[in-house]
Image (cartoon, rainbow, N blue to C red):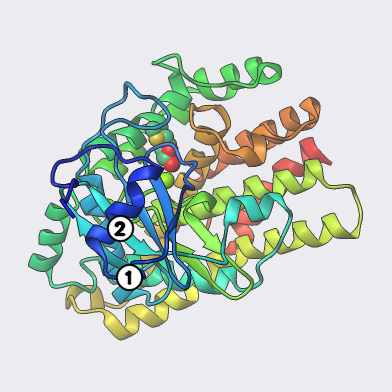
Amino acid sequence: MQDRFQEYFLMSETDIEDYVRSRLDFFDLDKALACTEIGDGNVNYIFRAKGKNRSVIVKQAGKATRIDKNWFLSTDRGRIEANILTIQEKLAPGLVPKVYLYDPVMCAILMEDMAGYTMMRTALMQHRSYPRFAEQISTFLVNSLLLTSDVVMEHKAKKEHVKSFINPELCEISEQLVYTEPYNNEKNRNLVFAPNDDFVREHLYENKPLHLAVAKLKFDFMNNAQCLVHGDLHTGSIFVNDMHIFVFDPEFAFYGPAGYDIGNIIANLLFAWCNARTTMEAGPGRDAQEQWLESAVTDVIDLFIEKYHAAYEENVSDPMAQTEGFADWYLGSLLESTAGVTGLEINRRVVGMAQVKDITTIPDASKRAAAERALITAANRFILCADQFRTGADFLSNFLDAARNTLC
Ligand code: SR1
Ligand code: MG
């Protein structure tokens, strides 16, 4: 058969069977494949091709984002995503989907299907709990972050990594949507929930001390090539089942501050808590869901700290990083940046253009408004007092204090 995939075009469901067969030797020739578009993200196109016994995911980078067809992005993000998944599979085996092939012509990744798994945000909005989550994500975080840093990697090899993960356009999205627009609405595309207009003006747009703290975090994001970060590690980038998780969708990857990934996780667990609090009936079911989410927040941080120390001890290679006191100082800086990013991720998802369904689908307007105010209150303290968060309990109590005042 003539290969009609020699030149880039944006594929649709009807192209996927031919495409997959042209690239992989996976499927019986005499059985048709069921091909469906399954993505609902803001950026790329994701298809599942399913044969009798096997299935595969095709993720193609379009030239424009899905959220805005006039917003053009380099398709090089497909290469970056395939490369980071391959590295993370070595560092955290089994916690990311396996890449079968990256096709630089179609800018498409063919990868393992996470069949039998649910997107974590969807599952959390169904108020399901995953007792193994903190254990698994903390392993992923320590391995993918610490082991790609200068503490562990040979420094010239690490600099080669930094080069190959330069991701200017995707980083620019975060610089705008996370580090700028929630504080000034400069492109007039924030989506502020009307009952909170005044609150947002006072606490975000006119809050000068907050702007200074955010500016410092923005320049840390742009200049601190610390670790190979996923770059968009919210609960829509994780697939879960009762036993296991997969982290996927790392097209925003680059060398940046470790706290960027950890803070994203914490913030998104707090969105799930707000969803449970405002949409579940008061009673034992809601209490259990909230308690699980609260322990997930504390455990992610505390297990990260515990595993960080063990991994540091085992893997540190830089002689100066072995100086007594350095590991603790470095950890302190990671936790400070984690707190700052937790606050930034909260604010951008509450008022920015890319919001989260956990909050936007809360049906009762006064509960949604109260949840958003609690989140912004907690977020601003995460940002302004970032150096005061050193344990899981510190992270949780800041949020619960804010929630107690507005949501209980
Ligand atoms: C144009 S992309 C908007 C947002 O979606 C992605 O998941 C990232 O979070 C990005 O900021
Ligand atoms: Mg994504």
Closer to us: 243 or 372: 243
Residue 26 got which mark?
A: 1
Closer to us: 54 or 245: 54
Callout 2: helix, strand or loop? helix
Q: Is residue 314 above or below residue 300?
A: below
Quarter where residue 334 is shown: bottom left
Q: Quadrant of the N terminus?
A: bottom left
Coordinates of residue 117 in the picture (x, y in percent): 56, 64
Coordinates of residue 94 in the picture (x, y in percent): 41, 75
Callout 1: helix, strand or loop? loop
Q: Is residue 206 above or below residue 134?
A: above
Coordinates of residue 285 in the picture (x, y in percent): 86, 59
Q: Is residue 387 above or below residue 208?
A: below
Callout 1: few (<14), some (14-19), or many (20+) C-alpha neighbours within 10 Å? few
First reached walking from the N terminus: tag 2 or tag 1 = 2
Residue at the (58%, 32%) spot, across then down: 350
Residue at the (41%, 78%) spot, across then down: 309
Q: Amino acid at mark 1?
A: Phe
Going by the picture, which residue comes out furthest to the right? 283
Marks 2 and 1: CB-CB under 8 Å?
yes
| Label 2 to label 1: alpha-carbon separation | 8 Å
Going by the picture, which residue comes out furthest to the front? 30
Going by the picture, which residue comes out furthest to the left? 156
Q: Is residue 60 visible?
A: yes
Q: Is residue 154 above or below residue 286?
A: below
Q: Where does ligand 1 appear, by image quarter?
A: top left
Q: Amino acid at mark 2?
A: Val
Residue 20 got which mark?
A: 2
Callout 2: few (<14), some (14-19), or many (20+) C-alpha neighbours within 10 Å? some
Coordinates of residue 165 in the picture (x, y in percent): 19, 52
